[in-house]
Image (spheres, rainbow, N blue to C red):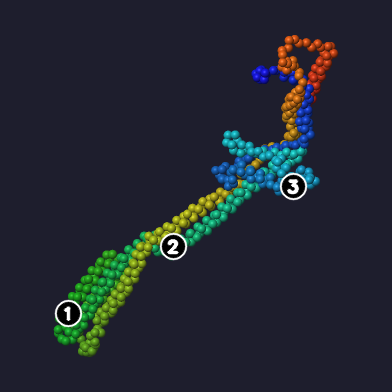
Amino acid sequence: MPEDQDSEPLDMERYLDVARRRYPLFLISLFLGWIVVWGASWILPVRYKSSTQILVEQPSMPKDYVISNVNDDLQDRVQNITEQILSRTRLLHIIDHLNLYGGSTSRHTPDEKVARMRSDIEIELVRDPTTLKVTAFKIDYTARSPRVAQRVTGELTNLFINENLEVRQQQSEDTTRFLQSQLEAARQSLAEQDAKIRVFKGQHVSDLPSQQASNLQILAGMQSQLENEQDALNTARQQQVYLQTLINQYRTLQSTSRGGEGASTGLPGGLPAIEKELDRLRSQLADLSSRYTDRYPDVQKLKIQIANTEKMRDQLIADLKGPPKGGSQPDSAARDLTDPSQTSPLLQLQGQLQANKTEISNREQAIAGLTAKVGEYQARLNDEPIREQQLADLTRGYDQSKASYDDLLKKENESKMATSMEEMQKGERFRMIDPPSLPLKPDFPNRLKFCAVGIGVGLALGVLVAGGFEFIDGRLHSEAEIKALLPVKVISEIPHIATPADERKRKGRLWLRWAMTALVFAVILTGSALSYLHS
């Protein structure tokens, strides 16, 4: 039997019979469920939502002209501004200013008021669907009064706009100040590097790489001058030997001339030497004249030597020839009394010899000075690679500091321009597209939605109530149930004979059900219409 019953198809007649029996309970449960939910929509406190949308305007100046020095991540900036605006201090100021949440007479603590206001504020970012870039954002505020909702939304909107301007300007000024501090540090570093280079150049002004060509030229000139001095020293030493020879010859010639006629024998020995020296001096003069002018010191000196030598030659010739034949005896006696060593040619030779010694000493000192200077300049040239490396190290640090300084100077100028742009409010800014709306209908509760939810709750409640009563009812309501309980089959049945009174009762119950159904649905439709009109 149970297996046969489980395999039987769904008995729709049975369920219809249950629906006919439990229809009043279902209808009453439906009405009660709906009336409770729908009535709650009229009991719950009404809340109005005021909304506004703020557009994010791009800078009016082209980015190629002025580069912004503010964080370009709009979402992060909006989040930071939101956190600042939703801070306890800001919200308490708005609550006290607009006397929100019961004002000073409210039992709520300030923290509870701030928490409630935060829950009543909604901020939604609006993105471009193609680029997903934030282009605007919405601000919503919910309150029990439409005017209050509008005023609070306006206050929040002004806070967002003003706070954005302040934040951007503050960030721009902070960036400029940071760059200025970095630029000042770079300027000091550059000045230190420049001072090091100046000190280094001042200490090594003569052996810097830039002085290499000048040092080489000076060294070449000194070497040439040293060679000339050495040549002049050799010439002076030859001149010394020559003058000493002349002096010796002249003294020998004078001593032999006092001895008698043999004085004429000394003439050929002295004059050829003088003539030879004159030829040498004239040849040297011709060589110097081909290279230098007459004002050159060596040329003038040679001319003086040639003149003195010629004068000495003429004097020597005149002395060797003796006094004139008609000369007086007193002059001869005076000559005999005079020291031969003090005669005029000899004095001239001795003077020239002394001058020659002085010249040799001066030449030697000059050569020693030139040799020391040549060594000094050679040492400079030898130190130039070291100085070049040291200067390159200093210059490399200076170049790096200079490049850093120039880069910071450029960034500082750009940042100053960006700060000026922010101060003139030409940068990115928030602009309110529409003023905060004045809500005419409440945002909560949505009575039409509550009406639909009530119908659903009533249907579910009706099914549960009807099903529950059917489940706990132990009576038999159909012939099939009676037959299932009998051990034998039913041979015949006695039909139900309805009397006119029974028929009237059945029709009365039927009209009552339809009347109840019409009343319930009329009430639901009326409530739905009222909800629609007030939604």
Badge number at residue 267: 1
Q: Position of residue 63 (x, y in %)?
A: 56, 43
Numbered disc 2: secondary structure: helix
Left or right of residue 120: residue 401: left
Quadrant position of the N terminus in the picture = top right
Q: Which mark is in front, 2 or 1?
A: 2
Say the numbered circle drawn on residue 213. none
Q: Position of residue 387 (x, y in %)?
A: 40, 61
Give the spatial CA distance, label 2 vs label 1: 68 Å
The kind of residue on which mark 3 rests is: Pro
Q: Answer with the quarter of the image where residue 341 lies.
A: bottom left
Give the residue number, with chain letter if any, for mark 2: 201
Query: Mark 3 and mark 2: span between their CA atoms?
Result: 73 Å
Measuring 20% from the left and 86% from the top, which residue is drawn there?
A: 327
Which badge, 3 or 1, is on the more N-terminal residue? 3
**Is 283 above or below relative to 32?**
below
Q: Position of residue 106 (x, y in %)?
A: 79, 45
Q: For the image shown, how many numbered marks are present on the structure?
A: 3
Q: Which residue is mark 3?
A: 110
Q: What kind of residue is marked 1?
A: Leu
